[in-house]
Image (spheres, rainbow, N blue to C red):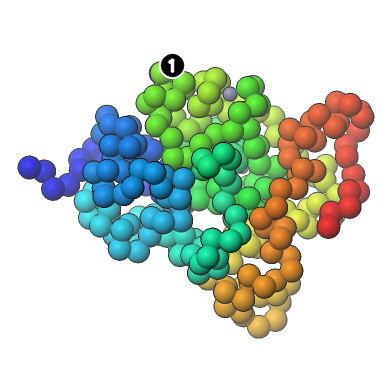
């Protein structure tokens, strides 16, 4: 009897555990439900993997896959911060839809990835902007308008059935997500860019485990951030930063939406 898994895909530096488990199930030729049962994880908790897979459970998984304990460290730091920041799970920081875990994506990033995957920050509602490509993150497939899930059974999603079991393909219509033309952040107002930068600062705080109010001043423990008034911008939906909403608005009005009352 084998005590470890073979043919394990290499976790990417910023990859979310949900993304890697999706690729692991694919590599083993089994469903995500079967994989989670094998790993002594409750398949009914699949939507919470990016928060729950950390500490001892993640260490065991690394050992089972004969991976060094250094893999998925970025994911783990952020998952631990999430637990610390919101132990009662009162604030929805992660992108969810109908009890399923979903993610936003940057088309340009997906095009450049050697191994298409979901970085952990793409799971966060606050991460609305790709600083690498200075564009808004896409929320749904630009062809069929449907959200992308992580974890997902890559083999049996429509993309997998069509021969493209990768995160760079829409899980519903199989079209390339990288073909979307993103909305440049240069089109946004200063107030809108401020929200985007706050989201980035929030994720940096999650990684470091502490934050500075306004980016200056004394270092505060992450747990104090939960009382911060701006925390609401990290969890709530802001339609004016939705690429689909902006495209529709621009097609109706013939110009870029500007100067919305943000708060
Ligand atoms: Zn990007
Ligand atoms: Zn699609």
| 65 displayed left or right of 140 | left
Quick check: 158 above or below 216?
above
Residue drawn at x 51%, y 31% is 168
Quick check: 159 above or below 187?
above
> Does residue 103 show up?
no
Where on the image, by quarter, is ligand 2?
top right
Residue drawn at x 54%, y 61% is 89
Q: Position of residue 11 (x, y in %)?
A: 37, 47
Q: Which residue is mark 1?
A: 162
Residue furthest to the left: 1
Q: Decide which of 197, 242 is in the foreground and name it.
A: 242
| 241 displayed left or right of 85 | right
Quadrant where the image shows the C terminus: bottom right
Quick check: 250 above or below 60?
above
Q: Position of residue 153 (x, y in %)?
A: 39, 32
Quadrant where the image shows the N terminus: top left
Residue drawn at x 69%, y 64% is 231
Quick check: 186 above or below 247?
below
Give the quadrant of residue 164.
top left
Q: Position of residue 167 (x, y in %)?
A: 48, 33
Residue drawn at x 60%, y 55% is 92
Badge 1 density bin: few <14, some 14–19, many ≥20, Cα 10 Å: some
Q: Position of residue 99 (x, y in %)?
A: 53, 42
**Which type of secondary structure does the marked residue at label 1 adopt?**
loop
| 166 displayed left or right of 96 | left
């Amino acid at each position: 009897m084998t005590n470890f898994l073979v043919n394990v895909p290499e976790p990417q530096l910023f990859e979310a555990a949900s993304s890697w488990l999706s690729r692991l199930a694919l590599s083993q030729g089994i469903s995500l439900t079967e994989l989670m049962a094998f790993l002594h994880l409750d398949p009914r908790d699949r939507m919470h993997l990016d928060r729950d897979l950390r500490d001892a459970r993640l260490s065991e998984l690394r050992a089972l896959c004969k991976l060094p304990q250094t893999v998925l460290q970025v994911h783990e730091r952020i998952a631990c911060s999430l637990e610390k920041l919101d132990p009662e799970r009162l604030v929805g920081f992660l992108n969810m839809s109908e009890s399923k875990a979903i993610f936003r994506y940057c088309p340009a990033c997906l095009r450049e990835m050697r191994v298409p995957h979901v970085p952990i920050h793409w799971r966060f509602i606050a991460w609305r902007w790709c600083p690498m490509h200075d564009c808004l993150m896409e929320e749904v497939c630009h062809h069929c308008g449907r959200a992308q899930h992580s974890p997902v059974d890559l083999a049996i999603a429509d993309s997998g059935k069509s021969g493209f079991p990768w995160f760079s393909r829409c899980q519903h219509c199989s079209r390339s997500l990288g073909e979307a033309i993103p909305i440049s952040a240069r089109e946004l107002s200063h107030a809108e860019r401020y929200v985007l930068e706050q989201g980035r600062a929030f994720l940096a705080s999650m990684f470091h485990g502490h934050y500075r109010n306004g980016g200056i001043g004394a270092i505060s423990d992450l747990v104090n951030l939960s009382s911060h008034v701006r925390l609401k911008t990290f969890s709530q939906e802001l339609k004016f930063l939705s690429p689909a909403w902006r495209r529709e608005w621009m097609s109706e009005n013939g110009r870029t939406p500007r100067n919305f009352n943000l708060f």
